[in-house]
Amino acid sequence: MEEDRQHIIELIRDTADERLYQITVSNPRNREKIAKVKIRPVMLKGSLLFQETAYIGNQVFHGNFGKEALAERIAGYMTEDFRQCEIETTQERDIILVSKKGKININRKRAEGGKDIDLTHNRAKSYILEEGKPVPFLIDLGVQTKEGKIIKAKYDKFKQINRFLEFIEDILPTLPKGRTLHIIDFGCGKSYLTFAVYYYLNKLQGLDVRITGLDLKKEVIRHCSGLAEKYGYEGLCFLQGDISDYEAEEEEPQGAAESGQEDRARDENKVDMVITLHACDTATDYALAKAVKWGAEVILSVPCCQHEVNKQIECSQLQPVLKYGLLKERISALVTDAVRANILEENGYQVQILEFIDMEHTPKNILIRGIKKKSKDKTAAGRTKGMTDFLHIETALQRLLQ
């Protein structure tokens, strides 16, 4: 372990200088602690320092460190807290990976092309989809001009897209390797995020993906299908339909003579990720229920309007709150999402409630992220029922997964 730690320290000493673009430490061993760390070089009062941004729950913490302190911090992160570290410089791209058994591998590669390094303290935020770089679907969806400039009225949408891609970036190590990834986006609407996820995974990450966008509106589906065909996105398709009626392709493979072929064919049909963005009311519950039944590895859900609990909730102890319509509406929405998160935990998911985007842009800013664990937490079973009985409610998700 000490030898591995020293190798990491030497790597940071070798790469932490003016050539460094950024360091990203991700894939935490315990998601209740620090979720992700990003580091970039900054010039402060004539000295080169390294600014750390650490994401813990809904909070962000900053700190500036010298090279030696930075090397020690990253060595500590990789031997205790995280499983992946990516170091990008103008000359190389290095990756540190830690196996489940604690074995550390360091892979160093020469970088293709180069990146401009900005050492100013308050430089513009770096987005996954960069400002000034034209992206075809962003242009056609009215977010960018043909020159890549973000249209002022759509800047919040641009930030929302990039924020969602950061969530996708976080869960990449969780997804299966060596086969086509199958993703379903329920209630895709105009499909800003559907196109963004496909572009990020397929074009930027080079992964083989198959994404299905589902929505009730025929005209929206026709428009999005036309754009996918225009861009040559062969792995992206759009279907018209209701979430409650949709069934994924889970059929048994035909003509597979060997069990190994059957397993591979079955894996190809497995749903790996389910996305729901602002699926109204109980539509979110139907999407979550299907994700659980399919055994999806990742669930990313941003709920929308929620009326079911608001119509049912009764509790004499909370009457001083519930007698006010606005407060009743808000507490009902929070309880609904709490029930959803706890039910996912009861079904074997590690769940986080995260802030999707700033409240100033939309009040619908809660994201429920579920990562499937190897085994269910038996202690979680049934713990939601006490709360729902106390409030005299029963949600659609409870009924669907009984």
Image (cartoon, rainbow, N blue to C red):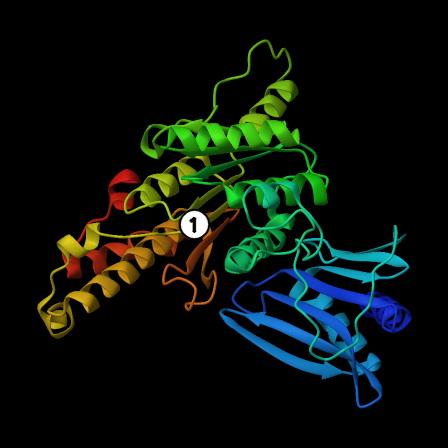
Q: Position of residue 94 (x, y in %)?
A: 83, 57
Q: Is residue 261 visible?
A: yes
Location of residue 246 (image quadrant)? top left
Q: Position of residue 356 (x, y in %)?
A: 47, 60
Residue drawn at 70 percent across, 34 percent down: 178
Q: Nearer the viewer, residue 127 or 219?
A: 219
Q: What's the residue type where badge 1 is placed?
A: Ser
Which quarter of the image is occupied by the N terminus? bottom right
**Left or right placement of residue 26 versus residue 223 in this view:** right
Q: Is residue 233 visible?
A: no
**Left or right placement of residue 72 versus residue 380 in this view:** right
Q: Position of residue 235 (x, y in %)?
A: 61, 29
Is 254 above or below relative to 125? Answer: above
Residue drawn at 66 percent across, 32 percent down: 179
Which quarter of the image is occupied by the C terminus? top left
Residue drawn at 36 percent across, 52 percent down: 303
Q: Nearer the viewer, residue 243 or 69?
A: 243
Residue extending farthest bottom: 45
Is 273 above or below relative to 40? Answer: above
Q: Position of residue 325 (x, y in %)?
A: 15, 65
Judging by the rendered image, the residue that carries numbered circle 1 is: 301
